[in-house]
Image (tube, helix red, strand yellow):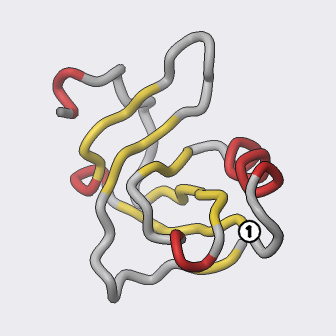
Amino acid sequence: LLAASDPLPERLYPITVYRGAVADHARGVSWSLDRAVAERFSKWMEDGASVWTAEIERDQIYAYINESGRNEQEVMLVLPDDYPVEVA
């Protein structure tokens, strides 16, 4: 999937990724490189949503989507159940 994705921005890894979600969905597959995007999603959700963070390596990213109309800097990844995820 990554080969078919938008090109990943050049960055030093590990990087911080962000996700706006309630605790039960903190480990979903859609994350962003932009904290403001995650904050926006957390505000759209029900009460109790937070911004979650994780430090990831490049090889954990399955896809990167940054369509010009959305500009979400979205990374698709699957974190194991025991992978550290924290509230920002």
Task: Establish if 86 lies above or below 42.
Answer: below
Where residue 52 sits: x, y (%)?
62, 68
Where residue 36 sits: x, y (%)?
76, 45
User: Picture quarter containing residue 8?
Assistant: top left
Q: Amino acid at mark 1?
A: Ala
Residue pictured at 49% horizontal, 23% vertical: 66
User: Picture quarter containing residue 7?
Assistant: top left
Residue pictured at 56% horizontal, 44% vertical: 33
Left or right? Give the position of 70 relative to 77: right
Task: Establish if 73 lies above or below 76.
Answer: above
CA neighbours of label 1 inside 10 A, class few (<14), some (14 to 19), many (20+): many
Name the outermost residue toward the top: 68
Task: Establish if 83 lies above or below 55.
Answer: below
Q: Quadrant of the C terminus?
A: bottom right
Where residue 53 sits: x, y (%)?
58, 67
Left or right? Give the position of 6 relative to 71: left
Q: Which residue is mark 1?
A: 49
Name the outermost residue toward the bottom: 82
Task: Establish if 55 lies above or below 63.
Answer: below
Name the outermost residue toward the front: 46
Secondary element under disc 1, as helix, strand or loop, is loop
Left or right? Give the position of 34 relative to 33: right
